[in-house]
Amino acid sequence: MKKIVEKFLVILAVVVLSCTSVMAEGLDDLGKVVDGSKLTNQQFAEDIQRSLVRGNLLNQGSGRISDLGGGVVNAYGAALCSVTCDKVMLKITVQRYSGGSWYNVQTFEDTAYNTATLTKSHNLSVSKGYYYRVKVACMAQKNGSSESQTATTDGIWIS
């Protein structure tokens, strides 16, 4: 019986230490900038890219990631055009930071026709103990011309 208790305590210690090391690794990275994204402990992060060119199709592309709690994030993307376009597309990619790099977790693709605005929002369950960010690729097409923008948020810690 004593050996069973000792084995149980060893296994419990290994589990606790491995969870603690993941948390410590994440917290040690707080404030670090990786591939243009700052690692934060905020509830949400947003990036808005605006066009500097007059007479353009795509005025603004934006992305936002929000911590909804319980290991669920909301990924939001928007493409705002200056005119009604033939086709507007969003590619929203949720990425996780691990081992010094960003890795794709899930991609959502949405398309709308004959519109000047496309906004989409998706909820996603993710693993806790990591930073997550959203990359949103926006594209607008009209009469054979196309424009695109990419918005990339900072990373938020999901605990």
Image (spheres, rainbow, N blue to C red):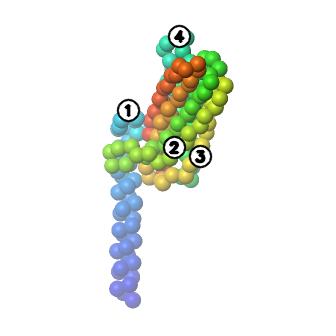
| Residue at the extreme front | 144
Vertical position of residue 140 compared to residue 64: above or below: above
Question: Could you give the CA–CA distance between mark 4 and mark 3, rounded to whole angstroms?
Answer: 35 Å
Disc number at residue 107? 2
Helix, strand or loop under label 2: strand
Q: Which residue is mark 4?
A: 54
Q: Amino acid at mark 1?
A: Gly
Q: Tag 4 or tag 1, which sits nearer the N-term?
A: 1
Looking at the rendered structure, the number of numbered marks drawn on it comes to 4
Q: Nearer the viewer, residue 145 or 125?
A: 145
User: Which image quarter: residue 79?
Assistant: top right
Mark 3 burial class by Cα count in 10 Å: few <14, some 14-19, many 20+ = some
Asked if marks 2 and 1 touch (Cβ < 8 Å), the reply is: no
**Could you tell which of marks 4 and 3 lies nearer the N-terminus?**
4
**Amino acid type shown at disc 4:** Arg
Q: Which residue is mark 3?
A: 123
- Distance from disc 1 to disc 4, alpha carbons, whole Å, reads 27 Å
Q: Earlier in the sequence, mark 4 or mark 2?
A: 4
**Between marks 4 and 2, how big is the CA–CA gap?**
31 Å
Please identify, in this view, whether the residue under mark 4 or under mark 3 is nearer the observer.
Answer: 4
